[in-house]
Image (cartoon, helix red, strand yellow):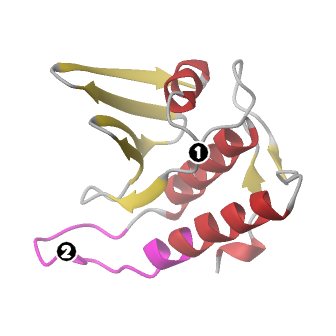
Amino acid sequence: MLSDCAIVERPSSGPRPQPGIARLSDSADLAVAESLRAQAEAIQQLGENWNTYGARSVRRELLLDGWGLAQSLVKLGCRAPQLVPTARGGVQLEWHERGRDLEVEVRELGVYTVYTCRGDEDEEFSVSDDVSRIRDLAHAFSR
């Protein structure tokens, strides 16, 4: 279970943080945290070939990294993303709303591939450690 693991608390920018426990302020935040935990635990249960097309099981450290990033973004006022497994053994955070999409894939620790789309405009880029650009994009989605 993920409940025995430290949650990675991420600052808005700067170097990778040390493990810590995310502080949540009210019952709505606790409900969001519980939803994220349930999604992460469901993903953790997936084995090899979970999609019947040869998908790898999700690497625990990548799941924890994505889960910690999601919680940190919520603490900063962003709407909670959906946590989704990837066939490569990573995890992806997703927001979709009124023709806008934001997807953040965790393929390796501290390295995030970001895809954003709004109408006919799309962009893909990578970030390492400094998640302020992800935070700014995620803030565009209402909470």
> Which quadrant of the view contains residue 89?
bottom left
Above or below, 34 against 20 in this view is below
User: Viewed as shown, does residue 1 lie left or right of 102?
Assistant: right
> Where is residue 10 shown, x and y percent of the image?
72, 36
- Using the image, tell me which numbered label, if any, was put on residue 51: 2
- Look at the image and give the residue range highlighted in magenta: 40-57
Q: Amino acid at mark 2?
A: Asn
Q: Quadrant of the C terminus?
A: top right
Residue at (54, 50) in percent of width and height:
66
- Cα–Cα gap, marks 1 and 2: 27 Å
Kindly state the secondary structure of the residue where label 1 is placed: loop
The mark that comes first in sequence, 1 or 2, is 2
User: Viewed as shown, does residue 30 lie left or right of 54?
Assistant: right
Q: Amino acid at mark 1?
A: Arg
Above or below, 65 against 46 in this view is above
Q: Quadrant of the N terminus?
A: bottom right
Q: Is residue 102 visible?
A: yes
Q: Is residue 6 visible?
A: no
- Using the image, tell me which numbered label, if any, was put on residue 28: none
- Using the image, tell me which numbered label, if any, was put on residue 79: 1
Q: Nearer the viewer, residue 35 or 15?
A: 35
Report the magenta stretch's main SS: loop
Above or below, 15 against 100 in this view is above
> Where is residue 120 shown, x and y percent of the image?
15, 20
> Where is residue 138 shown, x and y percent of the image?
52, 32
> Which quadrant of the view contains residue 87?
bottom left
Say which of marks 1 and 2 sits in front.
Answer: 1
Query: Dot 1: within a 10 Å radius of its alpha carbon, few (fewer than 14), some, or many (20 or more) residues?
Result: some
Residue at (59, 55) in percent of width and height:
67
Query: Dot 2: within a 10 Å radius of its alpha carbon, few (fewer than 14), some, or many (20 or more) residues?
Result: some
Residue at (73, 75) in percent of width and height:
3
